[in-house]
Image (cartoon, grey):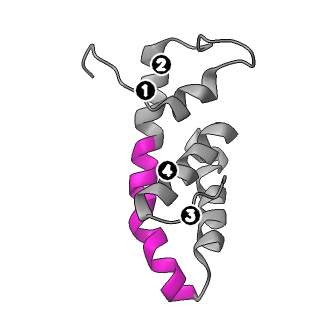
Amino acid sequence: MNDSITLPPSFVALYLPEGRTRPERPLREIAERHELCEDMAQMLAEPARMLPLALGITEADVLERMRAVAGAEDTGLQPAEAGWVVRRLAEVLGWPDPGA
């Protein structure tokens, strides 16, 4: 990782306590968590893209299933991070934002 860290505000917001302007974790740690979450969203993209045709389900159903995958205990993600992964996955696929 280089010294110039640029993170999506939507991800940094996961670490902002209500009413505060500074994250509760060091920027380097948030960057590491972001890399993990971004990798997961990218990894889930191709399987997610295939599910509507393979199973005859909606994009929203796929994203709900992917939320369960991202939120599984063995991923090591916090619930808010898993939610971000699903929103990022929808963005990568060009699907409607499930949080909107």
Judge left or right: residue 37 versus residue 68. left
- Disc 4 vs disc 1: which is toward the camera? 4
Q: Residues within 10 Å of mark 1 (few under 14, many from 20)?
A: few
Badge 4 marks a residue whose secondary structure is: helix
Q: Label 3, label 1: how many angstroms apart (C-alpha)? A: 27 Å
Proximity of marks 2 and 1: CB atoms separated by less than 8 Å:
yes
Q: Label 4, label 1: how many angstroms apart (C-alpha)? A: 16 Å
- Disc 2 vs disc 4: which is toward the camera? 4
Task: Say which residue label 1 marks.
Answer: 32
Badge 1 marks a residue whose secondary structure is: helix
Stretch in magenta:
38-55
Amino acid type indicated by mark 4: Arg
Q: Residues within 10 Å of mark 2 (few under 14, many from 20)?
A: few
Task: Say which residue label 4 marks.
Answer: 88
Which of disc 3 and disc 4 is earlier in sequence? Answer: 4
Amino acid type indicated by mark 1: Glu
Task: Say which residue label 2 marks.
Answer: 29
Image quadrant in which you'd find residue 69: bottom right
Majority secondary structure of magenta residues: helix
Number of the label disc, if any, that sits on residue 99: none
Relative to 73, is 23 above or below? above
